[in-house]
Image (cartoon, helix red, strand yellow):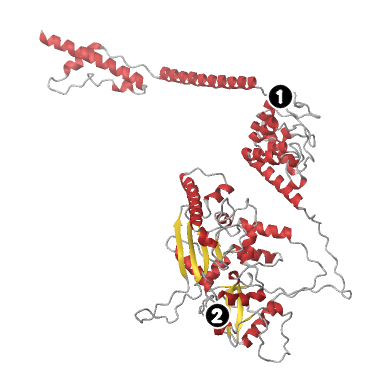
Amino acid sequence: MSQYQYHVFSLPKELLDTLVPRNVLNQPTAPTPSAPSRPVSPTPTAQPAVGSRACNVCLGATFIDVEDQRAHFRSDWHRYNVKVRLNGGEPVSEAHFAQLVDGLEDSISGSASSSEGDSADSDAVSALVHKTRKLGGPSSADDAPTISIPQTALVWFHSPPSTQIGIYKAIFSKRTEPAQYLDELKEMQHGGERGRTWAMFMTAGGHFAGAIVRVKRPDGDDDDDGLTKKGKPKRPKPEIEVLKHKTFHRYTTRRKQGGSQSINDNSKNKAISAGAMLRRYGEQALRDDIRNLLQDWAEDIHDCERIWIRASVSNRRIFLDYEGAIIEKGDERLRTFPFPTRRPRISQTQAELSRCLQELTRVKVSHLTEEALRAQDEALLAALPKPRPHPTSTQPEAKPKIQPAQPQLSPEEEALRDKWTRLLDMIRRGRIDTLKAFWEREGSSLGGVNAPVPEWTEERGGTLLQVAAYAGQEEVVRWLLEDLRADPTIAVPAPRTGAVAEADESAQESDTDAPRLPRARGARRTAYDLARTKAVRNVFRRCAAAHPDWWDWFGTEHGARVPSALSAEMEEEREEKKKARRKGLKEKVREREAREKEREASATPPPVAVEQPKVANSVKAEPVNGPRKLGGSTVGNESVAGLTPEMRAKVERERRARAAEARLKAMQGAGR
């Protein structure tokens, strides 16, 4: 395939008059080998995407370079088609894939492009595959075998003898049939009085780029002579003119983490860090900036022929489906880019938008002879999977495999299952605020608080109270008992046996903080028996003390099997006992420390008494001009060894006092 040579809105008239469409769908079978070799008539044939830079899964998508091919293989569109093909389904075009993603429910987080560093299996792809499995029914055995021809994002036209041009199908109107593409292409060469304008918007990772571009000038805009007033040739006007453009960036994504802050908040607990608050503010500011820009460009957008938007599912809500939206959600002009795009960055925001515009408006050109085209068509048809033949009466019928019948669910049953799934998930996770709002809205449709939990959920409990008690959610159990007055006397259905039951019993019996009723294997169990923590069991006991007339709390045969009530006075008394016990322990520790100190003091030998005359003589014996130490002689220092610091200090003070008295007496004797 050669480089771009023509502009889609300015094709040469001599080329336009010779174009014929190429479409292999009009050929029921491949040409037979015995057919005589003759020039191909201008009947529709196929232009398959064959080559190393093409995708055989995604309806023959072609690429310009290796980077575009790698980006396509990482995109959600390609991953969805691969999963669908593995499940025996048919791949879809990128435009159809975008419509499928837009049709998902708001609870599903949108998957961004591959350049945003999302995981290999995004939520949107998994949800679409699951939805396709449910909606896709078995094909009828009476259907005739048909050949499925891969569709491409390009529509190809042939100009004899050896020129082919390809144009993106997204440029044409959605109401145009494939047989009318050529007529619309000829109509595109006229710009009308105002010309043809497009609106293009791209946003990802907090980056935004928008532009209003003129892809075709109005008719009569070109001068006939092409000369200026001075007789010089005029500079040719560009084929594409940017009328308005705007780019800006907000901090919405954590570096090297991927995903916006809103998606992270929906999937996990709401972060409270400073960075999370800045990212939430950045998302709000980005949304306001984009919508204000759309409001400023409202008149230009209204006159645009096509509106191209590159955004994830969550980011598309910025442009559509809000009060006072400039672009309506079902606008016929809306398009997604039919080729892989890169995330607009700070230094290349407008450059990526310009690259996509060039990709859309430049015609793809190839030069293949008619023999080469015929061989290409035959190779394509030969590579397609052959349809399975229907069994006839002469062929032995294969014995059908016995498979468990899976009932087909109606939309009402699907909605009911979804409500139960969400309700049980809130109970297990302890989301009490969300649970209250959901129950106020949907509780009556689920049969009330004592409605049995469906068997297909495989929960460890037959009621919501039993599920909450087994999950250890204290607040949920209190809300069910006190606010909704759930029945705690309902027995747990189908008691389990085997290793699972033994593990549960051992886990329950290991917690001896509160009295438990003895019960044999297989005995009747209630929600209280499923509680595995003391905090949850105390909720039952407090409710039994506060509302003793509500239920048979203490019965074993038909009651709730609660061992005893737990009133506020009992809890206060228990707290007082705990405080007294802690106080007694502290006093015992102090007494033990005091006894240890006394034992150490009695085991230490008393200090050696120093007689007064000896101390005086020792002082007198010292030379007058020699050094004198405070405390007198050092005789007896060894006697303080092994004493406690307090006893050693006391001995030292006594020595110093006796030395001071000896010096005073010596001074008095010398004065006489």
Q: Is residue 617 above or below residue 8?
A: above
Residue 170 placement (x, y as % from top left): 59, 69
For mark 2, give the secondary structure: strand
Q: Quadrant of the N terminus?
A: bottom right
> Mark 1 is on which residue type?
His
Residue 198 placement (x, y as % from top left): 52, 66
From mark 2 to mark 1, how far is it between C-alphas?
A: 83 Å
Residue 49 placement (x, y as % from top left): 61, 76
| Residue count near mark 1 (Cα–Cα under 10 Å), binned few <14, some 14–19, many ≥20 | few
Instruction: Give the residue at the far right of this rendering.
Output: 393
Read off the residue under disc 1: 547
Q: Quadrant of residue 237?
A: bottom left
Is residue 253 visible in the rendered image? The answer is no
- Residue under the point 48% across and 61% down: 210
Along the viewing direction, whichever of 57 and 186 lies nearer the viewer: 186
Q: Is residue 6 above or below residue 497?
A: below
Q: Is residue 296 toward the left or the right of residue 436 in the image?
A: left
Q: Is residue 302 toward the left or the right of residue 130 in the image?
A: left
Residue 129 placement (x, y as % from top left): 67, 60
- Residue under the point 81% across and 59% down: 403
Q: Quadrant of residue 166?
A: bottom right
Read off the residue under disc 2: 365
For mark 1, give the secondary structure: loop
| Residue count near mark 2 (Cα–Cα under 10 Å), binned few <14, some 14–19, many ≥20 | some
